[in-house]
Amino acid sequence: MRDLAIFSGASNTFGLGLELEFRPKYQDDMWLRENGMYLPNPREPEDIEYWKKYRWTKLVSDELNVIEYNIHDLIQINSSRNIGGNSIETMHILLKDDDTIKKLLNRTKYIFLEIGWFRWWSPEIHGKDGGGYPNTVNEILNYIENPKSDKEVIQRAVEWLNAYDNDLMWSISFNTYKKLKENNPEIQFVLVPWQFDINMDLIDNSHFFINDIVLNDYIDKNGGIYWYLVNNKLTIGDVAKCFNGEYRYNTKDEHPSSKGHLQVANMVINHVRKNNDLDIYKI
């Protein structure tokens, strides 16, 4: 029986920021006055319960009656990246001819992939010893500036940046996605467009992907879930006490608030049910 839903993406998928909305430490007036809030905020084990309770992946799993297999829990709890640290890595790893991966896929009913700005993923670098290497352009730049960074990784990262072509990179990634989907016809794939910077006209057989992408009129016209959240005041920065009082902070957190996660879950569930010819679920 297929009873799992795999979720892979980035910080929006593992729930970062929800600790600022709910954890008692960040509701304490005295603590906030003394410390303020300066992002990035250190991630602590006490944060995990708030991520897991309110994030969109849990809400979707509960409604679809499947087990939530959020790949980011493996990283946060035991530092394992055995099926990747983001959706690009996960796609590559799920294509491996590996018995453990095959058993996982045999139990999987859905695969949800948060898509955003393109990320660097090299099997030789990111796949060799469990990670810790940069993926996004900003992470790469920070890694290059760190004197403790591995010189070989820096060289490969610079080569990747110099050859970076957004349209080409997405085309390669979607070809990987297409192969993964064709290899697993019993699994329903769902793409969740957080930062929608993809030129679909340049991707062969784009219709192959369009039906998998969670879209509504607002997101289609405004470039992704991120802008939906920002423009509808559904971010942590809109609700967390540390950003809405007389406290010091450097920048507001733009991850989804609990209401933001609820709206994302609503979009995703509606998409799944619509594609399965079921009644649309309303939150």
Image (cartoon, rainbow, N blue to C red):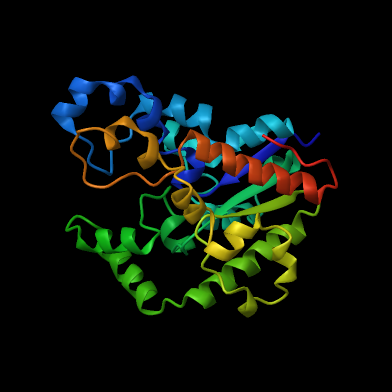
Judging depth in this view, the residue of 236 and 172 nearest the camera is 236
- Quadrant where the N terminus sits is top right
Where does the image place residue 129, in percent across and percent down from the top left? 41, 50
Q: Name the quadrant containing residue 120.
A: bottom left
- Quadrant where the C terminus sits is top right
Judging depth in this view, the residue of 33 and 81 nearest the camera is 33
Where does the image place residue 228, in percent across and percent down from the top left? 51, 52
Q: Is residue 46 left or right of residue 42?
A: right
Q: Reply above or below: 87 against 117.
A: above
Residue that appears at 62% across and 67% down? 174
Q: What number of labels is visible?
A: 0
Where does the image place residue 46, in percent across and percent down from the top left? 37, 24
Q: Reply above or below: 114 against 240.
A: below
Judging depth in this view, the residue of 202 and 120 nearest the camera is 202
Residue that appears at 52% across and 26% down? 53
Say if residue 186 shows up in the picture. no
Q: Name the quadrant containing residue 79.
A: top left
Residue that appears at 43% across and 28% down? 48
Q: Residue furthest right?
A: 277
Where does the image place residue 128, in percent across and percent down from the top left? 44, 54
Q: Is residue 184 left or right of residue 16?
A: right
Q: Is residue 259 left or right of residue 254?
A: right
Residue that appears at 64% across and 78% down? 201
Judging depth in this view, the residue of 183 and 195 nearest the camera is 195
Say if residue 169 shows up in the picture. yes
Q: Residue furthest left?
A: 34
Q: Reply above or below: 19 against 105.
A: above
